[in-house]
């Protein structure tokens, strides 16, 4: 999980209202290429 967080994390927050405080990670989905669709098109399709 640490490697995935390093590669795809875009942010991390601490939720202090949660006992004990929790860390919330915002991760981006890894873009994949296919033979008929380059990585840019894959990202555009999800927006």
Image (cartoon, rainbow, N blue to C red):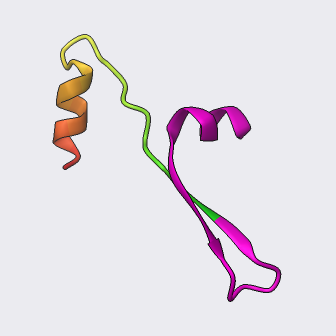
Drawn side of residue 43 relative to residue 19, left or right: left
- Closer to us: 1 or 19: 19
Q: Is residue 14 above or below residue 39?
A: below
Determine if the magenta segment contains residue 3: yes
Looking at the rendered image, the quarter that the N terminus falls into is: top right
Q: Is residue 43 above or below residue 14?
A: above
Residue shown at the point (29%, 17%) measured from the top left: 34
Coordinates of residue 25 in the picture (x, y in percent): 58, 57
Coordinates of residue 43 in the picture (x, y in percent): 24, 36
Q: Is residue 16 above or below residue 46?
A: below
Determine if the magenta segment contains residue 22: yes
Drawn side of residue 11 relative to residue 47, left or right: right
Drawn side of residue 8 relative to residue 17, left or right: left
Residue shown at the point (68%, 89%) measured from the top left: 17
Residue 5 image-quadrant placement: top right
Kindly give the residue lying farthest to the right in the view shown.
20
Coordinates of residue 3 in the picture (x, y in percent): 68, 32
Residue shown at the point (80%, 86%) measured from the top left: 19
- Closer to us: 14 or 5: 14
Give the extent of the magenta segment: 1-23
């Amino acid at each position: 999980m640490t490697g995935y967080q390093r590669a795809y994390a875009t942010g991390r927050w601490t939720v202090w209202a949660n006992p004990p405080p929790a860390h919330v990670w915002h991760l981006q989905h890894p873009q994949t290429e296919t033979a008929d669709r380059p990585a840019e098109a894959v990202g555009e399709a999800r927006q």
